[in-house]
Image (cartoon, rainbow, N blue to C red):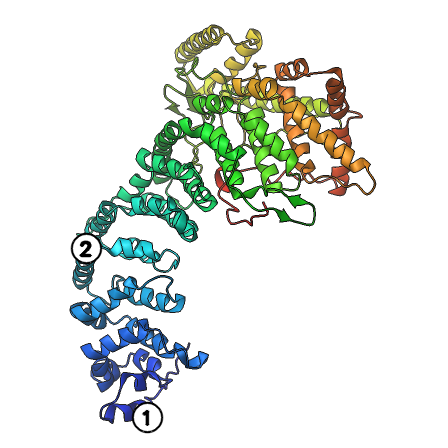
Amino acid sequence: MFWDKNYTPSQNIEALLKKENVTVEEFLDEDDIIQECKSQKKALLNYSLLMNVFMRPDVIRRLVELTLTEPPEELPVAQRFRHANVACELLTLGLPSLDEKLLADADTLKLLYSYLENQPPLNPLLASFFSKTFRTLFTKKSDQDWFLYQQMCLKLLEYLKLQNNFLDLICKHFTTPVIPDLIMQMMRNVEGGQLKRSLYDWLNAEGLIEKLIRILAEPEECEKHTNVSEFLCDLIQQGRTMRQTEQDNDSFEPAFDGSNPILKNIESAPTLEALFNVILQPNAQESAIVSGITVVLKIIKPIVIVDERNSDRLKFLQDRERKIHEDLLKTVICVIEPHLKHFNELLRNPPKKPDIVISAATLSPPFGMTRLQICRLFTVLLQTNNEDISKAICETDFFETLLYLFKQYCWNNFLHSEVEKCLQIVFYNSSTNYNNNNISNISTQIIDSSQNRRCNLGDNVFDNRDNIFNIKEEQQCTPVVAYPEINDDRRMGDGLNVDEDRKQEQQRQEEREAELIKEDINSEMAAQPVDEVKNEEQSSEGAKLEFVEVLMESNVNVNVEQLNTNIDEMSTDNVGDNNEQDLTKVSVNMGPSNLQTHVIVNCKIISKLMDCWQHNRDVESVEKGCRLGYMGHLIQIFRHVINCISECENIGALIEANFQSDAERELWHSIMNNDTGDLTKALKTQSQLLANCNAHEACDYNITLDFLADTDLSDAL
């Protein structure tokens, strides 16, 4: 509202000030009372009788009563909460003297606190008035003295500590989100490093996280589960943001160093173990399972740094977040690995749900959020490319169950998307990695020719999440993620001649790389003495021989001549700018990984995919038959398989060797034939319907960012 500069005091209010035995309600009935108090005129604010009235302890107490008291139901709806609303506005005007008097009066403060002792559910409107009034006690005003503010916050904190039941009362009202939000507001708004540290330590010592997990474990509290999971996710996000945005403070007040005890507690092994016990407890409610997995996914999700402009600080934050997240992933993997078989069993036998009738079919039972969240969890775990996790998943029938559900729920695109992501990880991420146990101690040095400086990548360049022949320079400032994104930039063109398109693109890329290498070598040779060049050539030759020996000892089938040629390219001092090219990429025909072998040989994944294709063909062939809902994702899965075969011939041979009959082999060729295959026809039709646009060109998957989305779907999933 915009106040008139020529505003004059209300004559009605002046009359009330002269009236004897006037009540607070009479002031609140005046339309101009808030405007009168907000006018900020000296004559009215500091010396007027109006302010003298509202600063009296008995008036403040009455305002608090009106703010928190349920009005009589016989009042008209338009008038029921008028007094409560105006009283709350007056209490939260931001006058430091008003806050001081409220905190100084023990009876008034006890009256305000007693609102939390009411039985749930609370009136949402009155709860918002209480939250707004309580929040103003620990929020610094612009014109408030710093030492006075610190004194007031300390007094409020000491009062809450003496009550011994503050967190219990907060947990009792989790069905009213504005009440637990008070804790979040306190953690965010309290200023001063020492005071903030005291608040965090107290909340952690009082067992805030343990109390919240205990709520998830109680079936009768199912209406609170979603709010609890959102609250825990907010705590994680706030703690990580605080760690990222902390700055040096040169003032007399030491800054809060960001070592958040609450965040450490959430990310600790005991808390993760408690979450898994809640999720996997017998006869667990779906709300508890979904909420628990949501928190786990939030813990695994890495923080992305995008707002830091200082390059040095950005690199520091990136390195620190990368190290923190690597340690966190080790903890999560160590705790979750023994439970994977139980998660797989829960995927097979989720909590019972009633049948749902939709336009396409009758869902008996519905797919449900439980199974969708479990699929998301397995997707993220597969993306870590951790050998122990992959081995544990291979010991279950997860992929068989996944393909069975894929076919059964043919219209659930949320499920189909997760299936595609899982298989994309299997056929791409695994196909480009070696046996990490055999080559984990290779040290490589990359020279940034644009800045003429070297950067040692350490003793474990080719770790579980890096492509061994696609190493990125550490100097580049990119958002921190825990593992690389899966981007399908290996396109199939128009789908008619895959091999030819790829060969032409590879040839053009090699020609560009050769020209750039030649230019960089000439510039480096011109700038270096002859003796220095010879020494580097000798050292690079030694590194090449050592690398080949390691691979040979690892029983890896490689073309030695091709490998020597590509390593020579890697050893030159010509990496260049990562924003334009990557000259360290080498194409080697490696054998299938253990995970690929498992899904192809043991799970018969190709046979199941062809069965889904044949099932759709049969449905389409009947009268008025329409294409099933999973076909868009199934086509994309076959594209992933084709791209993997084109890069690794052993994958194609392994697939051919594991067909159970000649009929399966014929069906495979009828689908995958480059000229007349069903896949080629489907891609051609799809291209025509999309006006020759590639539907996947500009929307590659970013699993690190999207696995937390769509958690509030209906039961029809």
Residue at mark 1? 11
Residue 580 placement (x, y as % from top left): 54, 32
Task: Give percent across and percent down for residue 683.
Answer: 74, 34
Q: Amino acid at mark 1?
A: Gln
Q: Left or right of 228: which side holds 59?
A: left
Residue 665 placement (x, y as % from top left): 73, 18
The spot of residue 124 in percent (x, y) is 40, 65
**Horizontal arrangement in the rendering, residue 641 relative to residue 289 (left or right):** right
- Binning the other alpha carbons within 10 Å of mark 2 as few (below 14), some (14 to 19) or many (20 upward) gives some
| Foreground residue among 542 and 397 | 397
- Do the residues bearing badges 1 and 2 touch, measured as CB atoms within 8 Å? no
Q: Is residue 68 left or right of residue 413?
A: left
Q: CA distance from mark 1 to mark 2?
A: 46 Å
The amino acid type, in three-letter code, at marker 2 is: Lys
Give residue 161's mark: 2
Numbered disc 1: secondary structure:
helix
Q: Say which residue appears at 20% left-offset and 53% top-offset.
A: 195
Q: Earlier in the sequence, mark 1 or mark 2?
A: 1
Identify whether 422 is placed above or below 123. Answer: above
The answer to whether residue 661 shows anywhere in this view is yes
